Image (tube, rainbow, N blue to C red):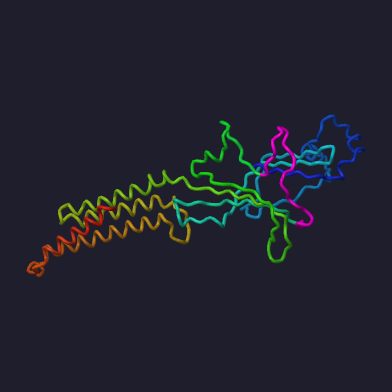
Amino acid sequence: MFFYLEWYDTRLSMPALWDALQVPETFIDITQLVSTAGAQGIRPLIWLPDVIFPDSQSAPVTTQQYIRLYPNGEIRYMRHMIISLLQSTFSYEQYPHDEQTIIIRFYSLTMYSSQLLFVAPTETAPSGINQPGFSFANSYNGEVSFAQNPLWNLVDSSLSYTSMAINQYFGTRSTCLITITVSRKQSGLVTRMAIPVLFLVLLAGIAFWADPNDRVGTTMTIILAVAAFYIVIFNNIPMVGYITSFDSYILGMFVTLFGCCVLHQSIARLKVTDKIHKWPLRKLTIRILECFGRLVMIPE
């Protein structure tokens, strides 16, 4: 992500300072100045906000940055960084039909909201277009890069500024809150995971028209096949402590296969047990059980 801040430091807008620097350009690249001064053992006293991302797993990795000082004391600070965020608001109960909200927030570590306040940009960019507080970068083909994400669809995004208490022991901080709502692209997951399991269960339903002696073995084989398939796709299911929609789907398939095994075994017992052979309702019961199993499996 690109992180961009602007502020004014009136201490650096002195005309005498700029006359002494004799800089022909409209700004000074402080990034280069800090790097050169640091190599000479000098630490320029330029104030920078101590911004932190409280939800980051580790310190952000900065790949590039620049700090520019303008004659009127304006400072523009940009960082391109890679950051991993913890998202406690994620819920996978509807997986793979889930919709998630990504929250990115940052504030000053040491300064209260009365000392440092984040506000929306009020000036226009060099192109003359109003500068948004938050936007997505474009890819090489000119389209929004996030919109081409192979796993998620962009639903909505917003930016807000608020005051937030870090905890009960510290005062409030001026906080910038970015909210991105995305929905999972589910067609590929359903095609690769849900439909093959459904076909395996339908095979168990076809067993009601097979030889009665082979029905139990066929259904048990299908149960083992579904279990093996579930182990393979388990890595694609979020490791959470509650049941997701896909877990319920697989559990329903196992219950259906278990019911098929019970029906097949009951029918087999009715056909081979000598004591039941004399029961006048034996054939009717077998027919009822077979019709029940076929009627249950056909809607599957």
Q: Position of residue 276 (x, y in %)?
A: 11, 68
Q: Residue furthest right?
A: 16
Identify the residue at image location x=88%, y=32%: 22
Above/below status of 267 relative to 145: below
Residue 279, how many percent across, how many down?
9, 69
Give the magenta part as a residue range. Answer: 111-133
Q: Quadrant of the N terminus?
A: top right
Magenta run includes residue 125: yes
Q: With 182 as the anchor, is 58 left or right in this view? A: right
Q: Is residue 138 magenta?
A: no
Percent across and percent down for residue 140 are: 58, 31
**How many numbered tags mark residues here?**
0
Judged by its main secondary structure, the magenta piece is loop
Residue lying furthest top:
24
Q: Is residue 2 above or below residue 232?
A: above
On screen, residue 209 versus residue 117, left or right, reads: left
Residue 296 lies left or right of residue 37; in this view the side is left
For the point 49% across and 41% down, the residue is 150
Q: Nearer the viewer, residue 232 or 99?
A: 99
Residue 114's x, y, as percent?
Answer: 78, 57
Q: Residue at x 84, y 37 (%)?
A: 71
